[in-house]
Amino acid sequence: MTDPNIPVTEDELHAYIDGELPSERRSDVEAWLATHPDDSERVQSWRTMAEALHARYDAVANESVPPRLELERLQRPPRKWLYGAIAASFAAFLVGGASGWVAHGATSARPTLQAFTGDALEAHRLYVVEVRHPVEVPGDEKAHLQQWLTRRCGRTVHAPELQSTGLKLVGGRLLPGPSGPASFLMYESPSGERFTVYATKTTTEAMQMRYTSEGTTGALFWADRGVGYVVIGGSDRQRLTQVAQQVYDQTERSGG
Amino acid sequence: MSAFRQSVEAMIPALRRYARALARDGDAADDLVQDTLVRALRSERLFLGGDIRSWLYTILTNLNKNRRRSLARRPHFMPLQDDNADASGTEAEGRDIERALATLVEEQRAALLLVVLEGLSYREVADIQGVPIGTVMSRLARARAHVRAVLEGERPALRSVK
C-alpha cells in the first residue's frame, strides 16, 4: 500500500513512464502530476524524447539486413578464433550471473556429465583439505606426472601452467571415473587457496560450459573432443572464471 | 539452423537500431553489430543458456566501450554530412535528437537507449552495464535532463546562428 500524500520523487517519475512503478502507486503519481505542472511538463518532455528516438531510429530496425551481417557469412572455423570466443563467453558468464543464464545445479546437464562432476566435487572436497598427502605425484615431477597420467588415462594429459593466475601445481592423482580413469590435478596459491582440475573421457561432445556450486565450492565444467573437464575452486566466480579460462585455453591448444 | 542461431538472427534488426543510436555513424554501427554477431557465433557452444537478448546487448555495449577507448587515441573524423536520414520523422527533429545523444557520456547514452529505445527493464540494463539498479536510474535521470536541456537550448541557437 502507498500513501497518496507521500511526495512523488523524481525516480518515481522515471519509473512511472518506464513502466517500472508498482501498479498501486500509479494513481498517486497521476494525481501528483495533475497538481504539479513542472513535473507534468518534465514527464511530457521525456515522452516527446522517447517519440523522437523512435521516430529517428526505428526505421533502422525495419531496413533489410545488409549481406555482411548475414549469419552464414560470419561463420569462421572456430578454433582460429578461440581466444576471443572464450574471452567473450567468460565475460558473459560473469555478467550473466545475476540474470540467470547459468545452469545452477547443472540439472540440465547430461547424466554422465553430472556423474563425473559429482565425482570431481567429491575428490576436490576430499583432497583439498589434505595437508600432507594431497597428491600422489608432486608438481616438481611434472614431466613424470604427465607421462604417467597420459599412459593410465589413455589420452594426452597436460598439466596447464597457471602461474599467470598466481597458482602453482601441487601435483596430481589418478582417480576412478564413471567411464574410465580420471586425471586430477591440484593447484595452490601462495595464500593456500586451492583449485583442482579433473578430466576424464566422456562420450558427450561439444557441450556448453556450465556452472554449479555447492556451499563455498564452485565448479565450471565442459566437454570437448571426447574429454570432460571440471575446474573447481571457491565461491568467487570471477576468480574461478579466470582459472578456468586458462585451463580451457591451454587444453584447447595442446589437445590434452 | 539451431534455435540459438535463430534467436541471434531475430535480434539483428534491434541490435542495428541500438548500435546506430549508440555509435551515430552507420558504418561504425554495423561494424559493431558484425563484431557482436561474430563473437556470439564463436561462443555458441559455450553459451550458458538463458536470455540471449540481454547477452547480445551486453556484448555490443562492451564492444562499443572498447571501440571508443581506441578511437580516443586516434584523431577523430566527423562525417561532413549525415547520409542516413531515415524515412520516418522529420529530418530536423532526427538531427536534433542525434546531436543531443552525441553530447551524452557513454554510460548515460547506453542506459537511455536500452531503456527508452530497446524497452529493457532497469534490472536488465543493470546486468548489461554491470552496475546496481540505482546507478542505472541515476544515469537515466541525468541523460534525460541533459538531452532535454540540449534540445530546448540548442534549437533556437541552431536556427538563428549556425
Image: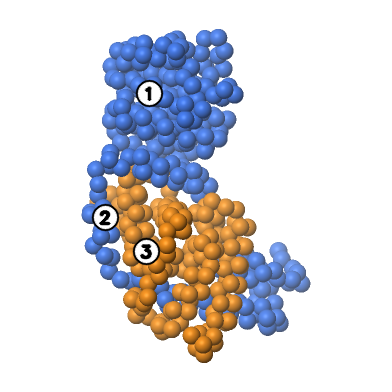
Label 3, on which residue? B29
Chain painted blue: A
| Label 1 or label 2, whichever comes before in sequence order | 2
Q: CA distance from mark 3 to mark 2?
A: 17 Å
Per the rendering, the mark at residue B93 is: none
Letter of the chain that mark 2 sits on in the rendering = A
Q: Are marks 3 and 2 on the same chain?
A: no
- State the image coordinates of residue A143 (x, y, percent, origin top left): 36, 14
Q: Assign a secondary structure to mark 2.
A: helix
The answer to which of B46 and A213 lies nearer the viewer is: B46
Circle 3 or circle 2, nearest the eye: 3
Label 1, on which residue? A199
Bin the neighbour count of mark 3 within 10 Å (Cα to Cα): few under 14, some 14-19, many 20 and up: many
**How many tags in the picture?**
3
Label 2, on which residue? A71
Q: Assign a secondary structure to mark 3.
A: helix
Which residue type does callout 2 highlight? Leu
Q: Quadrant of the N terminus of chain A?
A: bottom right
- State the image coordinates of residue A219 (x, y, percent, origin top left): 47, 31
Considering every residue shown, the one lying at the far bottom of the view is B160
Residue name at image x 58 percent, y 30 percent: A216
Chain painted orange: B
A72 relative to B160, above or below: above
Q: Quadrant of the C terminus of chain A?
A: top left
- State the image coordinates of residue A170 (x, y, percent, origin top left): 48, 17
